[in-house]
Amino acid sequence: MFLPEHDEVHISTIFTWDKEKAKYLQQQWKAFTDKPVLLGGPAFDDPGAEFTPGLYLKDGCVITSRGCPNKCSFCFVPKRNKNLKELEIKEGNIVLDDNLLACSNSHLEKVFDMLSHQKSIVFSQGLESGRITDKIVENLCRLKIKEIWLSYDPPHDKKALITAVGKLKKYFNRNKLRCYVLIGYNDDDFEHARERMKFTYEIGCLPFAMLYMGDIDNKNIIDKKWREFQRFWTRPAIYKSVIKKPI
């Protein structure tokens, strides 16, 4: 084993509960190099800068904008990026923008143009249902889509989700329409969370439970039953067996 030539070491951390591991890794690196060892990433409220393909993310991932204008109470994005910022568009087939559809029409046109010559396209960050128009659907239909991820953050997103899925499922089957469903936020309970998961499936999406973790550094304090619930509702092959009303 040997160290490659380097000017700095960057440790990029996504989740807050990994911050202590990142700090430990920083100390380990400092024992082997006299160069700066820097901590950053979303977990440390790093707002990010211009996107560089292959830096911190695997090949194919692309970020064309940062930030979101919605300022939802459960979301950390507005705390890191107070304003929506459109970036220079790079090549990629896995789109990771915070809220792509909140961007200007001119920016969206450039993004769809870039994606028009990509394969196996995944909108993995969750397109905002309320911003899916007929024009957006028309642009999506021209692409080689693998997965479109939507988001269902109760209670206000239900109507918007129904409308968006109604437009999309004419052209994309359930295996291509995925949906992040927020669970465990505020006074949520298992009965209502289960109803949302089934509802999401029945209107034409594959639900994926997203457990609200809060601003914590240790994910182990989250109720074990909620984590078990989440694991169940992130496995389509398992949860399909309990849904009696497929479409």
Image (cartoon, rainbow, N blue to C red):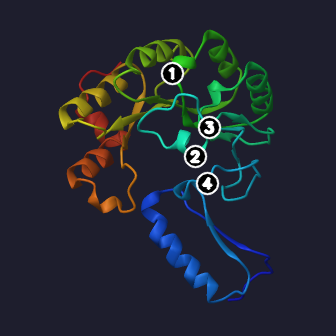
Report helix, strand or loop for mark 1.
Answer: helix
| Residue at the image point whose x is 74% and y is 74% from the top | 8
| Cβ atoms at labels 1 and 3 below 8 Å apart | no
Position of residue 2 measured from the top left corner of the image (x, y, whole percent): 71, 88
Instruction: Give whichever of discs 1 and 3 has the lower sequence position.
Output: 3
Q: Residues within 10 Å of mark 2 (few under 14, many from 20)?
A: some
Residue 28 sits in quarter: bottom right
Please tell me which of labels 2 and 3 falls first in the chain.
Answer: 3
Contact flag, marks 2 and 1 (Cβ < 8 Å): no
Amino acid type, mark 2: Arg
- Marked residue nearer the N-terminal end (2 or 4): 4
Image quadrant of residue 105? top right
Residue at image location 79% in from the left, 32% down from the top: 114
**Residue annotated with mark 3:** 67
Q: Residue at x 68, y 89 (%)?
A: 1
Front-most of residues 146 and 215: 215
Marks 2 and 4, how far apart at CA: 6 Å
Q: Earlier in the sequence, mark 4 or mark 3?
A: 4
Residue type, mark 3 in image: Gly
* Picture layout, residue 86 above or below residue 205: below
Quadrant of the rendering where the C terminus is positioned: top left
Q: Are marks 4 and 3 in contact (CB under 8 Å)?
A: no
Q: Is residue 128 left or right of residue 95?
A: left
SS class, disc 2 = helix
Residue wearing tag 4: 46
- Find out whether the residues at labels 2 and 4 contact each other: C-beta distance under 8 Å: yes
Residue 129 marker = 1
**How busy is the neighbourhood of tag 1: few (under 14 within 10 Å), some, or many (20 plus)?**
many
